[in-house]
Image (tube, rainbow, N blue to C red):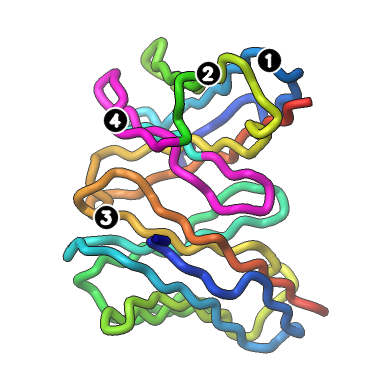
Amino acid sequence: AQKVTQAQTEISVVEKEDVTLDCVYETRDTTYYLFWYKQPPSGELVFLIRRNSFDEQNEISGRYSWNFQKSTSSFNFTITASQVVDSAVYFCALSEDTGNQFYFGTGTSLTVIP
Amino acid sequence: EPEVTQTPSHQVTQMGQEVILRCVPISNHLYFYWYRQILGQKVEFLVSFYNNEISEKSEIFDDQFSVERPDGSNFTLKIRSTKLEDSAMYFCASRRERSPASNEQFFGPGTRLTVL
């Protein structure tokens, strides 16, 4: 079973539109951590955010915001007023306190059209 | 700001050849990782390394793979006899402590391995 599911494979939006990337996770641990990474065409993984399971407060960082809902095991990512530079593949990841590795979702490829 | 570095950025090799991918983790980090990303697919865990030994490995990390910390700074991934399906981006990562509560797992920029 997949620990992290990103059901949206590809999304295209027109510049300045808002877009939400979905992430659903599965874990039996009570303590766990969720992450979002951006992978631009150059290939590196750019850290965006970490959220632990005890902190359900939503976070906003500039145009980025994250909605963590334990009740639905979701950790969605919204980009407001998207820009062409936001075009990338976005990965959601889970790290469990009992383990050591990251579990990545399959990624969502976002294309922002000018 | 300290960062994880990887060399080379791109390696091309013939099937059956041995390759060594190199990583320099952040200097005060104690836990080291390798991940693999086949083109267009998700990032997959290969192995974690602590105190000069493997602490966890995935089923992908079979006998053709090995890791080593030959000195105080480098962390290497060796693939003994490369196969076409080993073509992927390989990411190194490091963390100061084991728990993600305490600090980040930092990823390197990746090495793109192409097996011909």
| Residue at x 29%, y 30% (from the top left corner) | B30
In the visual, does A63 lie left or right of A43?
Answer: left
Q: Is residue B49 magenta?
A: yes
Indicate left or right for A18 with A98 as reference. right
Please state the extent of the stretch shown in magenta in the rendering.
Answer: B36-59
**Residue at mark 1:** B16
Q: Secondary structure at mark 1?
A: loop
- With A21 as the anchor, is A110 left or right in this view? right
Type of residue at label 4?
A: Leu
Above or below, A81 against A110 in this view is below
Viewer-nearest of labels 1 and 3?
Answer: 1
- Please tell me whether mark 3 sits on a helix, a strand or a loop: strand
Q: Which mark is residue B30?
A: 4
Element type where label 4 sits in the image: loop
Where does the image place residue B48, in percent across and percent down from the top left?
35, 33
> Quarter holding the C terminus of chain A?
bottom right
Tag nearer the camera, 2 or 1: 1
Frontmost residue, A63 versus B30: B30
**Which residue is label 3 attached to?**
A96
Work out whether mark 2 precedes mark 1 in sequence or the reverse, and give the earlier one. Answer: 1
What residue would you read off at disc 2?
A: B78
Vertical comparison of A71 with A31: above or below: below
Query: Of the numbered discs in the image, which one, if any, rests on residue B87?
Result: none
Amino acid marked by disc 2: Lys
